[in-house]
Amino acid sequence: MSGAPAGGAPEDPLRPDRLPFDRRFTPSGAYAQLRSAAEANPEEFWAAVSRRELFWSRPFTTTLGGTPPEYRWFEGGELNAAVNCVERHLAGSSAHRVAYYWEGEDGARRTLSYADLGREVRTLASSLAEQGFGPEDRAALYLPMVPELPVAMLALAYLGIPFTVVFSGFASEALAHRIQDLGARLLFTADGGYRRGRVVPLKEIADRAVAQCPRVDTVVVVRRTHLEVPTSSVRERDWGELLARHAPRVPAREVSSEHPLFLLYSSGTTGLPKGIIHGTGGYLTQVAATTRWVFDPGPNDVLWCAADIGWVTGHSYIVFGPLALGATSVLYEGALDHPSPHRFYEILERYGVTELYTSPTALRSLRRHGDEPARSHRLGRLRLLGSVGEPINPSVWEWYFRVIGQGRCPIVDTWWQTETGGILVSPAPSLDGRPLKPGSATLPLPGIDVAVFREDGRPAAVGERGFAVVRRPWPGMLLGLWDDPERYRSAYWGRFPGVYYTGDYAVQDSDGYLWFLGRADEVLKVAGHRLGTAEIESALLQHPAVAEAAVCSEPDPVKGSRPFAVVVLKPGIEAGPGLAEELASGVGERVGKFARPERVLFVAMLPRTRSGKIMRRVVQAVVLQGDSVGDVSTLEDEASVEEVRQGVARLAAELAAARSSRSS
Ligand code: PRX
């Protein structure tokens, strides 16, 4: 067994193959079998997986069609996502199985069986159809983590209406951009949502967004907080009234495999967030298969994916993956450590969670409270732990393993992206007993061909850092970018022809294990959330004092990284802490509080390439390291690097002076 690659995480002596696993994790050898079947004939393999996992009302005729890179999976086939996730589980005793144990942050609780879910989905779908909504429409959802969110997603899927869920931490401008770009007619929101004991006034934020979106003609409002909310200017429908209606029942709309199921707006480095389109048949195949391979939920298991449905993890592993398998999940509304860090462990204990899936940021924040909260709860039902969204530090991995998993549970470090739809690289303990290495996502799942390339497109050597790519199409891949086929081609298929570019750095070790090392582009990961530099910069540029802005990130002990901004002011404008605060707050108000830069530095000039692009990496290097700025040969004006340095030196001096005057 080799050690970790140079520059990667250090090898850890903890070897799960030496640990007393639950019998269910006895290597079955299935991984090798699945993998060789997939290698022998990838299309036949995926066709068999899809037929096994999904109900197709019309069988597909071509497994992989389209014109690269516009691949189309399962052409000729028809299906409905709500039928696959709910309706087909309603026959017999599985109808009484719990779909969701929901817990509100305020302590409210609700249990929804598949029968309950089916009833609500059908009733809502019928009411929406009665109001004239159909597959030619699009919808947006801006809701807290309440059961109404998956119900609404499924009701829209039932009618074949593509939707986008907007994370409830986004502010009105960010919400408006997404609604407008998609051309949504229908918006779901709530009077408010609970977050750390406060009520977030979602309806008020949504009203401000709707005022900028003339195509929205209906807003459906869920009552969650009993906050008094004014009525908006467009047609408003109360969720409770829609569910109480006796609208004529409509059948589920069978759609073609490539019909868009949902879009998720995700950030790039240029322009505003782009709508990543996921289809129906390919996406559902990927999430159902990976839920089975990675989490393997049995009939008595309870899965808790402690993510927000506003991001892809929640779509795939709270909603579509587990529901496609008829599994039971926990849905929790609020902050994991509210009102105390015991909350997280109480949920694990109360619902008897067997598979837990969360982010390194959540783990780092729980670890700060020490081991006592975990030790004071019964966590004996846990059998599998998962991590997603960022590289997991080996020390956090070890803590997760020893303290939360009590040394019994394997950890699945799952690597994937919004674009990939589902997990591509991860251990699969139900399929094999491969040794785990803390910090490595290990090997690609069956049927997935991930490689590490050098800049010139040749494979990197063992231990050499390069760019992670996917060489063969996979069913859960994005269908494209909304309204922007050119950008789809250039962002993902332009760098290495014929190969999908992930935007991540990775290293492969001598066991073939993959170590994902973070983004190679300028996409930020803050607390596991993906943020676009361009979206934050554009918020900064809306302030009348700002001439130019570059947003970068610096390490953070809990969030992994946090954004900071370097700003050039318009001539004659005085920099100062008051203005820095105003600019940071402006980002909070336009994009969302979670995107707010922690520091704003003022400089006279920003380094640019000859083609005019701001060199964020240089700015970042100067701010973090002071000097080693790397290759500056493409800078338009090298003096501007010096400017950045001087600006930083000034700020450092100012901060030091402020600190010493406070302490004296
Ligand atoms: O950089 C990788 C990181 O998250 C990015 C994708 O972010 P997003 O589209 O928001 O999806 C997050 C949930 C899948 C990737 O490009 N990432 C994701 N999982 C891991 C990871 N980095 C290291 N290890 C992981 N397990």
Image: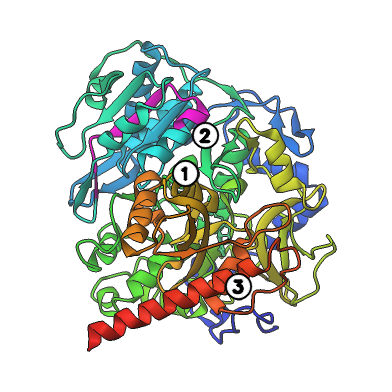
The dot on residue 202 is none
Mark pair 3, 2: CA separation: 46 Å
Classify mark 2: residues with Cα within 10 Å, few (<14), some (14-19) or many (20+). many
Query: What's the residue type where badge 1 is placed?
Result: His
Q: Nearer the viewer, residue 367 or 108?
A: 367
Mark pair 1, 2: CA separation: 9 Å
**Residue 447 visible within the image:** no
Tag 3 residue? 642
Q: Residue at x 36, y 27 (%)?
A: 210
Identify the image quadrant of the C terminus. Answer: bottom left
The dot on residue 262 is 2
At which x and y percent is residue 176? 42, 33
Nearer the N terminus, badge 1 or badge 2? 2
Tag 1 residue? 315
Classify mark 1: residues with Cα within 10 Å, few (<14), some (14-19) or many (20+). many
Q: Residue at x 34, y 17 (%)?
A: 127
